[in-house]
Amino acid sequence: MSTPISRRRFAALLGLGAASAALRPSLVLAKPPSLPATPAPPKTAADGIVRLSSNENPYGPSPAALDAMRESLGVAWRYPDERVDQLAATLAKLHGVAPEQILFGSGSSEILRAAGSATLAPDRPLVLADPTFEAIRRSAKLRGAEIVPVPLTADFRHDLPKMLAAIPHVGLIYLCNPNNPTGSLTPKAEVRAFLAQVAKDTTVLIDEAYFHFADSPDYETVIPLIAQYPNLIVARTFSKIYGLAGMRLGYAVAQAPMIERLSNEQAWDNVNVAVVDAGRASLADGEYIEKTKRLLLEARRTTMAALEGKGLRTIPSSTNFFMVDLKKDVRPVITGLKEKGVEVGRFFPALPTHLRVTVGTGPQMERFLGAFGAVVG
């Protein structure tokens, strides 16, 4: 039997609540001074590790995003519903779609998992490039779906005709464009022609994680094409140009019925208040994003030029990383660089002589070139 609360106890509880409310402002972290509007790269001292392995943005989030995350602590007790709606409305306006055509994930990797879960089955295979980003393979394995890899073309584009002809009754075709790990892009005319030929019962997932770094006139986002194709999903992320890889925020854009299919594969409240607020602030701080992009593209250009000056061939890159062909097994080089405090991308079996390098700050790329010269010669 429950014990009744006496009036004295009830008054004490009310007093405690009032005291707590009075104290609450002191528990919220004070807002720090405004951060500089220009990117502040991390230190690259000789005793530190230079991490050029995961395609992260070394300049980190926008100062406005950092402020938004700090301020979000004051509402940590609330579910993120209203904020999610606000971010969906912002993205919908940006992309020219309705808010119900936006679905958030804990990074775009959750979007890929949901797409795989919703479309793949033992009799509905996955078709993808080889090599490409591999997260979608896990969903295929969990669903018991056949995985059909199709080699890239000689110039590292998706071989779309071969992907179309690879196997009948496909559940999902995955295109990472620009592609990871090669940094290459598949031209917009080829992608448009491909979408027009895909069977209506085959879902196409186009991963545009590196969209912001693609500055070629031969590339375009396919988000405007969603209105034509009920079977098209586009995945985006805040992990790359927006520097929020550690906070986990991605999203899908598709027609509303497809979004509903994907949402059925997700948990409720899968994103948090802090990252949603950071996402909105990041979208509003275009000046910082452009500065970051400019610095990274310049570092990419100068580093690739330095490697090409050594007689090495690089794959033209439309991302914040690139691949260089060493004409030999890259595994000893990866190990040698790590011993010198520089971490680069892992070994890719489909391209065993190619080294993938994330673009870092200017000083970080100088560290890389120094270590590379010592290891490779």
Image (spheres, rainbow, N blue to C red):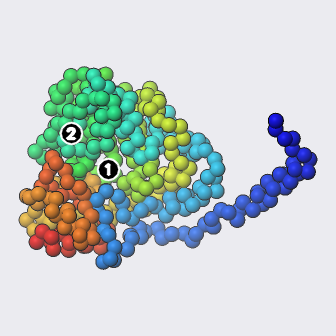
What's the residue type where badge 1 is placed? Answer: Tyr
Q: What residue do we see at 15% from left, 66% from top?
A: 307
Residue farthest along the bottom direction in this orientation: 46
Q: Is residue 282 above or below residue 91?
A: below
Q: Tag 2, which secondary structure?
A: strand
Q: What residue do we see at 31% from left, 43% from top?
A: 135
Mark 2 surroundings within 10 Å by alpha-carbon count, few (fewer than 14), some (14 through 19), many (20 or more): many
Looking at the figure, which quarter contains the N terminus?
top right
Q: Is residue 328 left or right of residue 90?
A: left
User: Residue 131 — which label?
Assistant: none
Q: Position of residue 297 (x, y in %)?
A: 28, 61
Q: Is residue 193 above or below residue 66?
A: above
> Quick one: label 1 or label 2, which is nearer the N terminus?
2
Residue 228 appears in the picture as rendered: no
User: Residue 129 — which label?
Assistant: 2
Q: What residue do we see at 39% from left, 47% from top?
A: 237
Residue farthest along the right direction in this orientation: 7
Q: Tag 1, which secondary structure?
A: loop
Looking at the figure, which quarter contains the C terminus?
bottom left
What's the residue type where badge 2 is placed? Answer: Ala
Q: Position of residue 82 (x, y in %)?
A: 60, 42
Residue 352 appears in the picture as rendered: yes
According to the picture, the residue beneath numbered tag 1 turns out to be: 210
The one nearer the camera, 122 or 184, is 122
Q: Answer with the quarter of the image where residue 363 lies.
A: bottom left
Please name which of the two marks, 1 or 2, marks the residue nearer to the observer: 2
Q: Position of residue 26 (x, y in %)?
A: 70, 65
